[in-house]
Amino acid sequence: MTEQRIDLGLTTATTPAGGGCGDGCGCGHRAAAPGAAASIPSAAAPRELRVEGMTCDHCVRAVTEELNALEGVEVVDVDLRVGGASVVRIASTGAADAGALAAAIDEAGYTLTR
């Protein structure tokens, strides 16, 4: 299993060998602009999710975009794990609705696992 840490907006991310979006990626998801850098607010309630099916930077951006669209979500950080469940950490200004989080992951085209 290949493991890659992508710290959104704080470091320059690289694509897994042979991966990437556009020519040769094969992930099939729509292009999304990278999110703006943000720091985790001290009042944020952190939450950690496991998401399957993510293979590249584009996949990370797709999930990040959908989650950032939810009210109260302040920061989304993804630990990309190609071939396994990626870890998605969310900081929000309150208790993020589990149903809304699951729907956002599904809308991005990925599977939320336990």
Image (cartoon, rainbow, N blue to C red):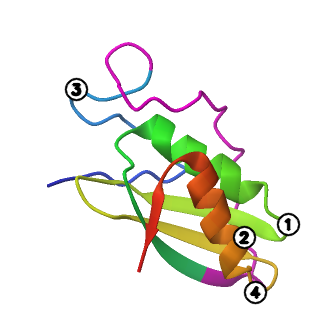
Category of crowding for the residue at label 4, using alpha-carbon neighbours closer than 10 angstroms: few (below 14), some (14–19), many (at least 20): few
Q: Which of pointers 2 and 1 lies earlier in the amino acid sequence?
A: 1
Could you give the CA–CA distance between mark 3 and mark 4, rounded to whole angstroms?
38 Å
Labels 3 & 4 near each other (Cβ < 8 A): no
Q: Which mark is residue 32?
A: none
Q: Residue 55: image x %, image y %? A: 34, 43
Q: Which of pointers 3 and 1 lies earlier in the amino acid sequence?
A: 3
What kind of secondary structure does the magenta stretch mostly adopt? Answer: loop
Could you give the CA–CA distance between mark 2 and mark 1, rounded to whole angstroms?
10 Å
Could you give the CA–CA distance between mark 2 and mark 4, rounded to whole angstroms?
11 Å
Q: Amino acid at mark 4?
A: Ala
Q: Which of pointers 2 and 4 lies earlier in the amino acid sequence?
A: 4
Residue hosting label 3:
18
Q: Which element type, helix, strand or loop, lies under badge 1?
A: loop
Q: Is residue 98 left or right of residue 86?
A: right
* Nearer the camera: disc 3 or disc 2: 2
Q: Amino acid at mark 1?
A: Glu
Residue drawn 63% across the image and 51% down it: 107
Residue drawn 68% across the image and 76% down it: 99
Could you give the CA–CA distance between mark 3 and mark 1, rounded to whole angstroms?
35 Å
Q: Is residue 87 above or below residue 34?
A: below
Q: Is residue 114 left or right of residue 90?
A: left
Residue hosting label 4:
95
Q: Which residues are magenta?
A: 22-46
Residue hosting label 2:
100
Q: Which element type, helix, strand or loop, lies under badge 2?
A: helix
User: Which quadrant does the C terminus fall into?
Assistant: bottom left
